[in-house]
Amino acid sequence: MEEIINKVANSVLEVFDLEDYYPAGMRTQIDISQWLIEGFLLKEKDFREQLNNQDWSQYQDQFVAVSCSTDAILPRWAFILITMHLAPYAKKIINGTLEDLDAAFYEELLPKIDYSVYKDKPVIIKGCSKKPVPMRAYILAAHYLQPYARSIMYGEACSAVPLYKKTKK
């Protein structure tokens, strides 16, 4: 019987997996509309009272995204006030969705990576992930890899889509 050889494992192809950089920790979405009258109207006195009565310790060491699920027109200070209550407990707070939160992580992490290890190598940005890697992270990864990589592909080694190939000088 002929031995099966894993050509992908033996190739010079470098895999850039964004999941490797996914920060561990609990992510939570807070919807500001829960403290609005009928989900739309902010009455400052009631709003402040509800925030003061909220148990913020439940967000201890969590990553928190604060947004409003309704079309309420809200003053900016409302989001900032919620942040003031969360700050002693949460690890990170952003205004937006959970996807925005994950994108913020990658926007902080990806510029700090040493991409020189990919110099003149074919790179595949791994496409399938078990974690919610946002599209912005893939775009940033490609941006940072391009000056170094000989070529960039997206997907899996068995079915990669070519994205970039350095031109020969």
Image (cartoon, rainbow, N blue to C red):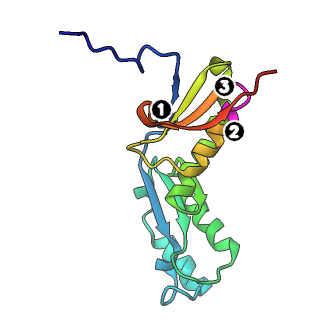
Question: Mark 3 and mark 1: span between their CA atoms?
Answer: 19 Å
Secondary-structure class at tag 2: helix
Q: In the image, which residues are magenta? A: 143-148
Q: Amino acid at mark 2?
A: His
Which mark, residue 143? 2
Please name the residue shown 52% across and 16% down the image: 12
Q: Nearest to the eye among marks 3 and 2: give it.
A: 3
Secondary-structure class at tag 3: loop
For the N terminus, give its image quadrant: top left
Q: Position of residue 47 (x, y in %)?
A: 55, 80
Residue underneath mark 1: 20
Tell which circle, 3 or 1, labels the residue nearer the N-terminal end.
Answer: 1
Please name the residue shown 44% across and 52% down the image: 27
Secondary-structure class at tag 1: helix
Q: Position of residue 123 (x, y in %)?
A: 57, 27
91 and 2: which is toward the camera: 2
30 and 44: which is toward the camera: 30
Residue underneath mark 3: 149
